[in-house]
Image (spheres, coloured by chain):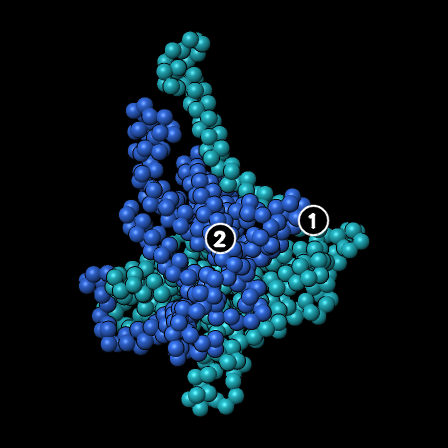
Chain colours: A cyan, B blue
Amino acid sequence: MSIASASLNHAGRPDHALNGDALNADARREARGMLALLSPGLFLVFAVIIVPIGWLFWLSLFDENGQLSAANYARFFEQASYIKTFVTTFRVAFTVTGACVLLGYPLAYMLSQLPRRAASICLIFVILPFWTSVLVRTYAWLVILQRKGLVNTWLMDLGVIGQPLPLANNFAGVVIGMTHIMLPFLVLPLYASMKTIDVDCLRASMNLGASPAATFRQIFFPLSLPGLASGLVIVFVLCLGFFVTPALMGGGKVIMWAMRMEQTTSLYSNWGAGAALGVVLLAVTLALLGLFHWLLGTRATGVWSQR
Amino acid sequence: MSMENALPISHRQRLWLYALGGLVMLFLIAPSLIIVIMSFSGSSLLEFPPQEWSLRWYESYFGSLEWRDATVVSVKVAVMTAIVATLLGTAAAYAINARTLRLTGSINALLTASLIIPVILIGIGTFFLYARIGLNNTLTGLVIAHTVQALPLVVLTVLSGLRSYDMNQEMVARSLGAGRFSAFFQVTMPQIRFSIVSGALFAFITSFDEVVVSLFISGGETTTLTRRMFNALRDQIDPTIAAISTCLIVLSIVLLSAAQLFGRGR
C-alpha cells in the first residue's frame, strides 16, 4: 500500500520524502498494533501487581494516626521480634542456599557429563518435583520428618535412637523442606551453563598432562561459576520471601519474613507495618537481582525459560 | 554426546559421582513416591510401608462434599486461567518478538515481574486491592490473580517458540495478499501451536497449584483445593491429603508429559 501511494507523487514532493512519510506512517501503525496486543497483559500486571504494591508503599509511610512518619520502618531496628525475624530469615536463606549448592552441584555436574539420553531421563527427577505443588512436597516432608514420622519410626525400630529426633516443627525441618523445594532452581540453570562448557577445553587440559581433578578445579569449575551464581541468587531471593514451608513446618517457632507479613496484616490488621515489611523485602530482592545483573550481565530469571 | 566428545575418564573412576548424583535424585523423588504409596494404606497411622492396602483415603476424598467443592473451584479457575493467560500471553509474546516497540526489554521485565516479586507481597497487595473493589472470594478475582502469575510462563514459552520460527514466512503470506490476522492464524500459529499448548498447560498447573495468593483472596464458596489443604495441614495430618496429593502428582506428570510431547512435535 505504501509503495503504491508513494509512486503517485501527486503532492509534487520528491519521491523519497513522500516514501519516507508513508513508511513512517506505516511504522507508527505497526507500533500501535503491537501496543494493542501487549496492552491487555500489561494492564493486568499493572492493575494487580504495580498498583497494589504502590498503594502499600504509600500506606507504609503513615503511622496509626494517619501522620506521615517513618515509624513503620523504625520498628524494624527497635523491636527485638522484628530483628529476630530478619535474623531467622537470613539464617534459613543462607543454610538452604548452602545445602542446595552441596547437593545441586554434584547432580548438575553428573547430568552434564552423562550421554544425552541418560541425562534427559535423570532430568525428570529434577523437573517433576519442580512442577509438583509446593504444598504436596511440604506435606510429604511433614509425614517423613514429624515426631512419629517415617525417619523417627525407622531409626527407633533399628534401635539407633531411643527418643524421637526433633526433625519437624523447627529450624531443621524448615531447612530440609525448603532445600527440597529450592534445589531444582539451582540445578536447572547450573546444568544449562555446564552444558555450554566446551569439552575441547577439558580435553586439551588433560592432553597437556593435568589430572582429572586438576582439570576440574582449574578449567571446569571456574567456567561453571556464572551458572552457579545465577542459581545461587535465585534460590537465595526465593528463600527470603518464602511462605508455605516455614508456615507449615516451622511449628510456630521459625518465623520468617513472609510469615511475619501475613501475621501483621491478617492477624493484627496492621497494614502499615505489613506493607513496610513488604517494601523492604521487595527492595532487598530487587537489589540482589540488580547486583547480579550488573556483575554478570545476565538475568537470574532464566530458570523459567529453560525446561 | 557422542563418543568422540568423551573425556579420557572411565565410568569406573566416576562411580563416586554417579553415587552422589543418585542420592540427590533419590532425595528429590522420594517424598513424592512415599506419599503415593502411603495414600493406598489401610491404616490411619502413617506407616511405611503400609501393613494393609485400601482405597479408603480416596473414598474419603471423593466422598467429601467440601473436598469435592474445593476441587471443582480449582479446576474451574485453572481452566479459565489457562484460557485467558494463553490468549494474553501469546499476543504479548508476538508483540515482543516483533521488536517494533522501543522499551521491549522493560515490557518483558514488567510482564515477567510476578516471577521475582515475592508472592506474599502479591497476595497481600491483591487482597488489599480486591477488598476495595469487591473481588475477594470470587472466581473472577481468582482468575485475574492467577492469570497475572501464569502470564510470564506463557510469554516465555511462546516467545521461545517464536524465536525458532522464521517470521519471513508470515511476511510472505502477507505480501501474497493475506491479511494480518489470516497470515497469523494460517501460517504462524500452526507452526508455534506446540509452544502455545505447552504454555497453556504450564498456566493450568501454575493456577491449580497456587497457594499463597489463593490463601488471601479465596474463601467461603470459592475456597480452592490448595487453600483447603493448607488449612487442613495446619490443624492435623489427615491421610486424606495423601490421596489428594497423589492426584496432584499424577496431574503434574500427565500435564508435564503432554507439554513434553507437544514440545517435541515442533
Do the dots labelled 1 and 2 sit on one chain?
no
Residue at 64 percent of width and 68 percent of height: A85
**Nearest the eye: B8 or A218:** B8
**Nearest the eye: A171 or B225:** B225
Residue A26, picture quadrant? top left
Residue B92: x, y in percent? 45, 39
Residue at 24 percent of width and 76 percent of height: B12
- Which residue was labeled with disc 1? A58
Instruction: Report how far apart the C-alphas of labels 1 and 2 lie in the structure.
Output: 38 Å
- Side of B14 relative to B84 (left or right): left
Q: Give SS at disc 1.
A: helix
Q: Is residue B232 above or below residue A57?
A: below
Q: Is residue A162 above or below residue B250?
A: below
**Nearest the eye: B43 or B145:** B43
- Which residue was labeled with disc 2? B72
Chain letter of disc 2 in the image: B
Circle 1 Cα neighbour tier, 10 Å, few/some/many (<14 / 14–19 / ≥20): some
Q: In the image, what residue type sits under mark 1?
A: Trp
Residue B87: x, y in percent? 44, 40
Q: Is residue A299 visible?
A: no
Residue A71: x, y in percent? 75, 58
- Side of B50 relative to B77 (left or right): left
Chain letter of disc 1 in the image: A
Q: How many marks?
A: 2
